[in-house]
Image (spheres, rainbow, N blue to C red):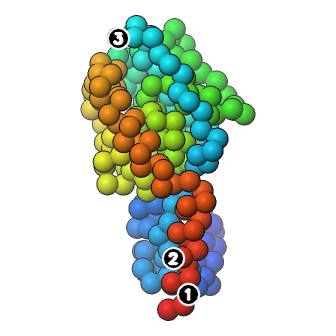
Amino acid sequence: ITQARIDDEVERIALASAILSPSPDTDRSLATIAGDDRIVRTSYATSLADVRPRTPRRPDAPVTFLFLGRDVVRKGLHHLLEAWRVPPPGARLRVIGIEPSPMLRLYDDVLSRPDVFVSGFTRDPLAEYARSDVFVLPSLEEGDPLVTYDAAAAGIPILASAAGAGRIGADGSVVRIMDTTNVEALRDELHALAASRELREDWGARARRAVADYDWMSVAARRAEALATLLNR
């Protein structure tokens, strides 16, 4: 992020009659530049028609945690890997979508563990949610994370930072929000979720109920209505 890019964005915002803002974090960022008058608070969404049923689990199957995202630092993956140095007993971690980077070499010992599976880009991310028990997104910064909506559609519990929770999880009743930069606290949350099927089922059901209002067609209708209201003013 350079000063030239910042100046260019500020200029574009100054020219806009309305600005679509997809998340609480983005609301706050835009308000410092544009004020509140032109901001249309909306969200991203998911395609509920594409949701796959979650794969049935055996009672003795290991609990599988999923991280899905291409970026490393921005998505806070390093905090998750640090927490996984003492993983929940018997649990597994799937890290999907990452590319090699100098930072990841710091975690070779974690990524090479037998309970960690690592993969690059996938053309079938929905399959990853279907085979997982908990989705973890410890992002430091987001617009509005599509992966959080997809995880909610799959009905799996979501453990995330405030940025990773996005609009759907902003009030804390749908996503288990925490300061994921606190590695000890993050580790405790991973252990708690791994140890309790009831806890996972409760938060998974919350996410699935909430995401019913975040299909792309529903979100598009709300965007259009909000935009019309602002412009008609």
Instruction: Identify the secondary structure beneath mark 1.
Output: helix
- The amino acid pointed to by label 3 is Pro
CA–CA distance in space, label 1 to label 2: 9 Å
Crowding near the residue tagged with mark 3, few <14, some 14–19, many ≥20 C-alpha atoms within 10 Å:
few
Q: Nearer the viewer, mark 1 or mark 3?
A: 1
Q: Of 31 and 208, which appears nearest the observer?
A: 208
* Residue 195 visible in the snapshot: yes
Q: Position of residue 227 (x, y in %)?
A: 55, 78
Residue at the spot 64% in from the left edge and 34% down from the top edge: 125
Q: Which residue is mark 1?
A: 231
Q: Which residue is mark 2?
A: 226
**Labelled disc at residue 211:** none
Q: Position of residue 135 (x, y in %)?
A: 46, 33
Placement of 111 over or under 52, stated as above or below: above
Q: Of 70 and 170, which appears nearest the observer?
A: 170
Query: Quarter-wise, where is residue 44 in the image?
Result: bottom right
Q: Quadrant of the N terminus?
A: bottom right
Are the residues flagged by discs 1 and 3 in contact, CB closer than 8 Å? no
Q: Position of residue 62 (x, y in %)?
A: 43, 12
Q: Earlier in the sequence, mark 1 or mark 3?
A: 3
Q: Nearer the viewer, mark 2 or mark 3?
A: 2
CA–CA distance in space, label 1 to label 3: 55 Å
Q: Earlier in the sequence, mark 1 or mark 2?
A: 2
Placement of 212 over or under 73, stated as above or below: below
* 104 to the left or right of 190: right
Instruction: Identify the secondary structure beneath mark 3.
Output: loop
* 50 to the left or right of 78: right
Crowding near the residue tagged with mark 2, few <14, some 14–19, many ≥20 C-alpha atoms within 10 Å:
some
* Residue 144 visible in the snapshot: no
Q: Which residue is mark 3?
A: 89
Q: Earlier in the sequence, mark 2 or mark 3?
A: 3
- The amino acid pointed to by label 1 is Leu
